[in-house]
Amino acid sequence: MMPTVYASLAALAGACIALQATANARFRQNLDSPAYAAFFSICGTILTASLLMLAIRPPAPSGAAIRQTEWWNWIGGPLGTLIVLAGATLTRELGAAAFIALVVGGQLVCAMLLDHFSLLGLKEQPITPGRIVGAILVVAGVVCIKYL
């Protein structure tokens, strides 16, 4: 039962990414600035995260835990900014479906490399012929969405 719930939540997160990219693209159009669209979107993220922290009041991590965190744990925010900026800039040009298909294709290739080389603390999951076929099918899907 839990794998189905997790898969459903992941699919819901994917829907949120498509909605976010489309909303940010419209925000960009209304503001005539991808930078401000990204900035205000991220302000919404900060506000939402702050309200969540106030609502659930999790215990603060220790200073030692923060200092011992690997450097790459801190890149999520800057990478998130780039993703928001890309959505605000590219969704209108490519269309929501093509933008998301390309994002998913990029995520898949990067994820396969992270898994294969067990980077950033992941367990090794080798690239197999089946995974390669899956990645090729995703790329074929991107081509179909964009050009057919």
Image: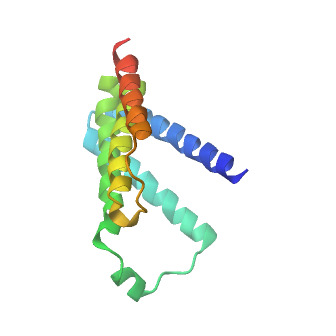
Q: Nearer the viewer, residue 81 or 135?
A: 135
Q: Nearer the viewer, residue 11 or 56?
A: 11
Q: Is residue 79 visible?
A: yes
Residue for point 58% across, 42% down = 12
Q: Quadrant of residue 102?
A: top left
Residue 17 on image: x %, y % = 46, 40
Q: Quadrant of residue 98?
A: top left
Q: Is residue 119 above or below residue 139?
A: below
Q: Nearer the viewer, residue 95 or 49?
A: 95
Q: Is residue 65 above or below residue 31?
A: below
Residue for point 35% across, 59% down = 76
Residue 9 on image: x %, y % = 61, 47
Query: Viewed as shown, does residue 144 lie left or right of 1?
Result: left
Q: According to the image, what is the colour scheme of the structure?
A: rainbow
Residue 5 on image: x %, y % = 67, 48
Q: Is residue 26 visible?
A: no
Query: Viewed as shown, does residue 2 lie left or right of 59?
Result: right
Residue 117 on image: x %, y % = 32, 57
Picture mark count: 0
The residue at the far right in this view is 1
| Position of the C terminus by quadrant | top left
The residue at the far front in this view is 129
Q: Is residue 142 above or below residue 121?
A: above
Q: Nearer the viewer, residue 21 or 121?
A: 121
Residue for point 39% across, 38% down = 129
Residue for point 45% across, 86% down = 62
